[in-house]
Image: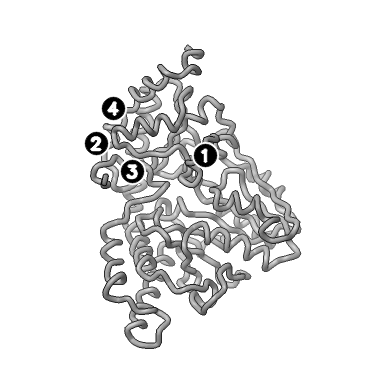
Amino acid sequence: MMTHNDAVYMDNNATTRIAPEVLEAMLPYLHDYYGNPSSMHRFGGQVGAAISQARKQVADLLGAEPEEIIFTSCGTESDSTAILSALQSFPEKRHVVTTRVEHPAVKNLCENLDRLTGHKHRLTRLMVDAEGCLDLQKYEESLAEDTAIVSVMWANNETGVIFPVVEMARMAKERGILFHTDAVQAVGKIPINLSETDIDFLSISGHKLHGPKGIGVLYVRRGTPFMPFLVGGHQERGRRGGTENVASIIGLGRACEFVAANMADENSRVKKMRDKLEAGLLSSIPHSMLNGHKTDRLPNTANISFEYVEGEAILLHMDQYNICASSGSACTSGSLEPSHVLRAMGVPFTAAHGSIRYSLSVYNTEDEIDFVLEKMPSIIAGLREMSPFWKAEV
């Protein structure tokens, strides 16, 4: 079986390697400290204390209070909980504002609200421009008396484009509207201080920040109306039923410390490697283009289209050299349709199908960048030789 030591791994927006420090923190709670944190005895109580510590670690990374942190199973659950909670809390309000470039966790939920809730809802999906950016004036015009919640991602998972969610949350609050952000890609890569914002809900997924899979967080601002998605026991102060996923909670807490300690490296060394990769590909491969704003972007993400070739074919050839990347969101990679994000940006059909997302982490090296820059031109040239679209172009 291939390990991370064999692969040039540039698919960190899909999932990240668990940091060794995180795994080390988790292991005792898979073996030695197996008590139920809800038990009255000391053996379970010590596990409950460890969960409280993890809750504080998450809160510290976000600039939040520990009691504002709810542990969930994943980012998708957190997204669903926030949006459905707002609609249940304000049944007279049936309007939801989101964007056309959201992750499927928000996009598909919003498109299925009528089926899920049995009510007639109105959905506004904001457009983006050719660089993947939103128009704040159009956003302001979309806010209405019956708007229950706005859900806008902090950073796009495919292009890395960062949205002005702090300003958008302020505009929503002025009109008494709740604001949710899917911050799955942003947390740990850029500084976030929720105490200085008007954001009501924020979603996290552990496996995007060098923590384990199967654990997430929903931040709920103190005083925000809230209806639980999973109703059961008293866990999470009655806000999310179900026995806690203890080892993964411990791992997520430690992962939050890890990314906080490495954020400066993410925004300097990793960003420089991303820029080198990007510049090298664009200069050495003709008919290639960057997708997304050049500067208002996560420091680790480069989405590049290679015209007249198929993204899936590119990935298969990259895999021959053990280079791992993506043609879009991992949650939609089974689809043969071009990315809904790139379609919303107006990327030409001949380019949208040939888009590759390179997403780096603090574990990537300069040698790996050089290796990819060495192999990619011949991969694209070889595929274009077989492409009827390319032959028609040249």
The x and y percentages for residue 354 are 47, 29
**Circle 3 is placed at which residue position?**
270
Q: Earlier in the sequence, mark 4 or mark 1?
A: 1
Q: Residue furthest front?
A: 1
The x and y percentages for residue 64 are 47, 67
**Circle 2 is placed at which residue position?**
367
- Measuring 45% from the left and 26% from the top, which residue is drawn there? 306
* Distance CA(mark 2)–CA(mark 1): 32 Å
**Circle 1 is placed at which residue position?**
335
Neighbor class of circle 4 (other Cα within 10 Å; few <14, some 14-19, many 20+) is some
Badge nearest the viewer, 4 or 3: 4
> Which image quadrant for residue 119?
bottom right
Badge nearest the viewer, 2 or 1: 1
Position of 154 with respect to 84 (left or right) is left
Q: Earlier in the sequence, mark 4 or mark 3?
A: 3
Residue 366 higher or lower than 152, as above or below: above
